[in-house]
Image (cartoon, rainbow, N blue to C red):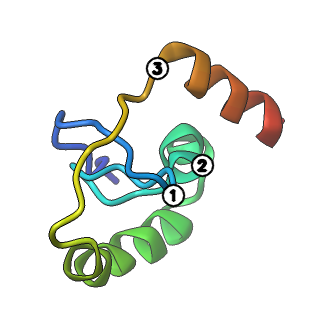
Amino acid sequence: MHSPCVARCGLNDDDYCMGCFRHIDEIVSWSSTTEIEQQVIWDKLPARKIAFEGDSNNQTISRAKWLATEAKQG
């Protein structure tokens, strides 16, 4: 299944990307999750988009943040 990434990455204060509306944990683990798990994430995105309306990107997803999240999951 393709990723919901829209290449407009930026995290809000709760670490949700304001481009694709996935949490950083979901972004980092995307390639290792099953298609069923990916579909569950896809199904949550429309509601998140509505819930986060008006929020802004406060930070970019830096390599350091990515690696820290990856280590936390591993």
**Residue assigned mark 2:** 25
Q: Position of residue 59 (x, y in %)?
A: 37, 33
Amino acid identity at mark 2: Asp
In the image, 72: left or right of 6?
right
At 59% across and 43% down in the image, what residue appears?
Answer: 29
Q: Position of residue 60 (x, y in %)?
A: 35, 28
The nearer-to-camera label among 2 and 1 is 1
Q: Position of residue 64 (x, y in %)?
A: 60, 16
> Badge 3: how crowded within 10 Å, few (<14), some, or many (20+)?
few
Residue contact at pointers 3 and 2, CB within 8 angstroms: no
Q: Position of residue 52 (x, y in %)?
A: 27, 71
At 55% across and 68% down in the image, what residue appears?
Answer: 37
The nearer-to-camera label among 3 and 2 is 3
The C terminus sits in image quarter: top right
**Residue assigned mark 1:** 14
Task: Name the one closer to the observer, 37 or 58.
Answer: 58
Q: CA distance from mark 3 to mark 2?
A: 13 Å
Answer with mark 1 or mark 3, whichever residue precedes in sequence: 1
Amino acid identity at mark 1: Asp
In the image, 70: left or right of 19?
right
**Residue assigned mark 3:** 62
Secondary structure type for disc 2: helix
Amino acid identity at mark 3: Ser
Q: CA distance from mark 1 to mark 3?
A: 15 Å
